[in-house]
Amino acid sequence: LSSPLPQSLCLVVPVWNSSTRGVHDLSRMVGPKGNQRKRRTLVQFLGDHFYDVQALREYFFRKQALKVQLENRSFLSIKNQYGPYITGAFFILKQGGAVKFQGEEWIRPSGRGHFSLDFLKFQAVPVEAVDASGCALNYNGLDNLLPLKELQSLWLQRCPHVDDWCLSHLHPLADSLQELSLAGCPRISERGLACLHHFQNLRRLDISDLPAVSNPSLIQILVEEMLPNCKVLGANWAQGLKLAPEEQARDAAGPVSA
Amino acid sequence: MLRRALQPSMCRCLSTRGLSARRGGSTLDWGGKVSEIKKKIRSALPGGSWDAPYDTSHLPPEHADVVIVGGGVIGLSVAYWLKRLEGRRGAIRVLVVERDHTYSQASSVLSVGGIRQQFSVPENIQLSLFSADFLRNINDYLAVVDDPPVDLQFNPSGYLLLASEKGAAVMESNVKVQRQEGAKVCLMSPEQLRNKFPWINTEGVALASYGMEDEGWFDPWSLLQGLRRKVQSMGVLFCQGEVTRFVSSSNRMEDASGEEVILKRIHEVHVKMDHSLEYQPVECAIVINTAGAWSGQIAELAGIGKGPPGTLQGTRLPVEPRKRYVYIWHCPQGPGLETPLVADTSGAYFRREGLGNNYLGSRSPTEEEEPDPGNLEVDHSFFQEKMWPHLARRVPAFETLEVRSAWAGYYDYNTFDQNGVVGPHPLVLNMYFATGFSGHGLQQAPAVGRAVAELVLKGSFQTINLSPFSFSRFYLGEKVQEASVS
């Protein structure tokens, strides 16, 4: 029993042969051939053959992105009326996160997203901590958080749209921020972690479970060197050991090792 | 009259030849018309001329609205924006002609991939800011349904430019312009530099400017492939071939002072296939010259620069290929993860590459040291003699480094003022340029593409005004030059 070559190893040469159908196809052969032979769903099949269905699919695709952009708009009118702290708090609460003013308790929205507007009286009270775990926060939305000059702790766990650009955008908070958590964010890589060197006052940094980071243990060492005063919570050292028995089982089922 | 009407029909019965030879004054000319119709029917039937006798599907189409010469990042960006800004779906037929589909010598993929806003010309800063915005939201622009998202592998580490005593004043005024345009750049003194980056030797440095956001470097190949995939899904036609000839027509006109001006219009582009004498004449309305380092040759084909020197007709496109080397070296004790792209006072610059303490860098040679652009061979002695001493001086850890590899690429170097040429040619009415960026084409590509598309579709620049970058500045002698800091 021989296993087939993984599809990513098929090299495709853009030559004229019987399966290319003209000018378009010659240049479409830039990726592995395997992608073109994947099974298509009904909607995909219809989209391949009818312009209207294709346009409709593209419309729904774009609408998803627009939804995120709408949630991350800047609340200028609130900012002018109530000031930066209230704007930041309102933005986070609307996204589904929690906010803590200095000297007050945590304010969280209910399960259905409702929150009371009691915090409007805290116009002059700075925001101390923000818990935006799981929120659809993106680069533009962070503009609402940057005026919070006394922010000490920021939790961005499992935020699906926070990426390397967002980390470079956070540098105005460098003076006050002491705790930052990026655990579980799917889009953050080691390139974004490199711009955390501005945060010299940081005392706790959580960079565990970042799927896009290529070498978690090496990155942890490099980040610890970059931020000497900070306690970096990162790769689980036992992670490498846990995978080994599973890998052995896979090898036994596969082809004879070379 | 009846007799006259009858006579042609009688003659047609006698001979099938057209009657116009015999009766030149006939207004109806039935004979000629019928033979034309017969010819058309014969050609439409199988075996006629509408059906080519051999397979022509590898050739470009016979008609296209816009032909883009050069399929690098700028050409693809223009194609993208043309398709995005067209009024109706499928309104414009765009053909991209690229000589080498493997992009083996293209400047786009051999580039170091940096993007910065630290320029002195405001238009350059605006172009770069828009491009950073484009790259940040790249999946909003270039995402295709059912395909994986584009991953540019952007490093937001910023640029650090160092200035000596001589260049400090210029750097300060540059930073002022940059901040006015909205770039996030800060000035640092040698003391602050030593605190932030302890591996720098600040001897000879009077001032430094550091870009905090929207600056860094990315993978140009991903951008190229992302653009290509999106542009194909929008219906742009691609062709692998070389442009060998332009067929144009001229028009003599007089300007206000009575001097004669010859205006040209390109009607056909002859695209020659690879390793073959076969070519296809593509009838087109507009030609966009984005051939990068070879734009000068394309312009010569269109007759630009053929005239008495000193006149507008005799002004060539001053873009030529210039070879630049990029070296990769390994230094175990080198600068850490936070290293920006550091540009030294001597002109040498370097950045980190990956996680294994590898660094990548280059330097622009002086005019006298310019290497021969005939090939892409690397001269390692250039690194030993002209780069290493400056690097080792600026970063003492680089005294023990080991060169791992190197490559060379072309700049589409504008010998006039080292900034881009964007806009139509004043005499060849339908040729537009988007070339000559001399090393910062990749970082300005998205914005330049939009500017050219606006120019073609709407007639004028709508978002960023690039009229200082027009071709006529070569004739008028108005240089738009970057104030260099060294």
Image (tube, coloured by chain):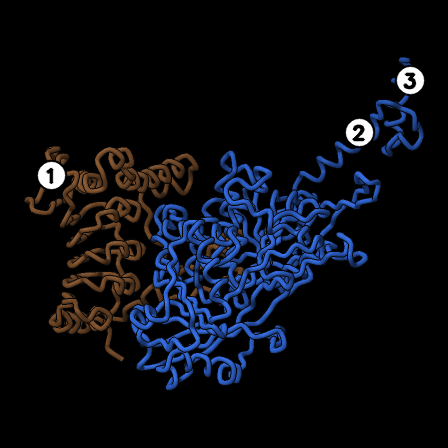
Chain colours: A brown, B blue
Say which quadrant the N terminus of chain B sits in. top right
Q: Position of residue B189 (x, y in %)?
A: 37, 67
Q: Is residue B291 visible?
A: yes
Q: B141 or B346: which is nearer to us?
A: B346
Q: Look at 70% across and 44% down and name the residue there.
A: B429
Q: Amino acid at mark 1?
A: Pro
How many other residues sit within 10 Å of disc 2, few (<14), some (14-19) or many (≥20)? few
Q: Nearer the viewer, mark 1 or mark 2?
A: 1
Q: Amino acid at mark 2?
A: Lys
* Residue contact between numbered discs 3 and 2, judged by CB atoms under 8 Å: no
The residues bearing labels 3 and 2 have C-alpha atoms spaced at a distance of: 17 Å
Q: Marks 1 and 2: same chain?
A: no
Q: Look at 12% across and 73% down and name the residue there.
A: A241
Task: Identify the disc placed on residue A109.
Answer: 1
Instruction: Please name the residue that numbered disc 2 is placed on.
Output: B33
Q: A92 or B29: which is nearer to us?
A: A92
Image-quadrant location for residue A253: bottom left
Q: Look at 36% across and 75% down and name the residue there.
A: B200
Q: Position of residue A81 (x, y in %)?
A: 24, 33
Instruction: Please name the residue that numbered disc 3 is placed on.
Output: B4
Element type at marker 1?
A: loop
Tell me which chain the residue with mark 1 is part of.
A
The residues bearing labels 3 and 1 have C-alpha atoms spaced at a distance of: 96 Å
* Residue contact between numbered discs 1 and 2, judged by CB atoms under 8 Å: no
Q: Is residue B222 left or right of A236 when viewed as pictured? A: right
